[in-house]
Amino acid sequence: NRVWVYDEYPRDQMFHKIQSTTLKINDFVTIIRNQEGQDNVTRRLIDRRYGMRRSVMSGKTIQEDLMGYNLYYEPSYDDTEGGIEAGHIAVKEFLGRQDEEPRIFVMEHCKNHIYGFTHYTYDTKTGKPREDSKDFMDLIRYLAKDNPRYDLWAGAQKQDKHYFGPSGYGE
């Protein structure tokens, strides 16, 4: 009933300071594979709207491009039902009450998550979360709405090369 954030990308710079990127899908695949290393990754989530964007290079969605490299992602929750507010409620429940033991732990080297937790505010003009602090908190929101559970059986079945993960899409 606890979650640990023990790694993130980028590791060496603050995400909100990156202006743009020239990375292509194969570059991201390399980054993902290096980042995951030997970790037993059984599920991956991707922002529902971002994952459905079509690439100008391939004409496929980002999710489809990643599938071509055997990287399978499930879309994040559908925020059209209840909006971001429903996600915020899920995060509050996920974090627990102040008088309870914490349910989420962020390793001190995960600077982007820490920045997100400590700087997440709304823009007073737009009424939306500020762009410079929302990305890593979006990840926490997706996680909270996903209601993650550790699956001992999935870990045991990982040894079977034909096991396609709890989603049925692969690891």
Image: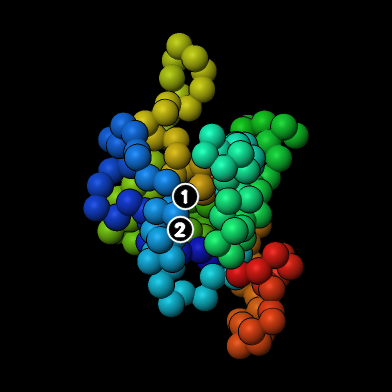
Report x, y in % for residue 152: 64, 81
Q: Are marks 1 and 2 in contact (CB under 8 Å)?
A: yes
Mark 1 is surrounded, within 10 Å at the Cα level, by few (under 14), some (14 to 19) or many (20 or more) other residues, namely some
**Looking at the image, which is closer to me, 153 or 162?**
162
Instruction: Name which residue lies at 52% across and 39% down.
Output: 57
Residue 105 is marked as none
Identify the residue shown where x is 56% and y is 55%: 66
Specify the quadrant of the image occupied by residue 1. bottom right
Q: Would you name the residue on which mark 1 appears?
A: 25
The amino acid at mark 1 is Ile
Image vertical order of residue 4 relative to residue 80, above or below: below
- The image shows a total of numbered marks equal to 2
The answer to whether 156 is drawn above or below residue 90 in the figure is below
Q: Mark 2 sits on what residue?
A: 29
Instruction: Name the outermost residue toward the left.
Output: 12
Q: Quadrant of residue 8?
A: bottom left
Q: Amino acid at mark 2?
A: Val
**Left or right: 161 with respect to 97?**
right
Q: Position of residue 106 (x, y in %)?
A: 39, 58
Residue 101 percent across, percent down from the top left:
49, 62
Question: Could you say which is closer to the camera, residue 61 or residue 118?
Answer: 61
The answer to whether residue 101 is visible is: no
Q: Is residue 59 visible?
A: yes
Give the image location of residue 158, x and y in percent. Answer: 61, 82
Query: Which residue corresponds to the image point at 25% horizontal and 47% vertical from the top-left?
Result: 13
Could you say which is closer to the camera, residue 70 or residue 114? 70
Crowding at label 2, few (<14), some or many (≥20) Cα neighbours within 10 Å? some
SS under mark 1: helix
Between the C-alphas of marks 1 and 2, the distance is 6 Å
Check disc 2 and report its element: helix, strand or loop. helix
Q: How is the image coloured?
A: rainbow
Relative to 117, say whether 8 is above or below: below
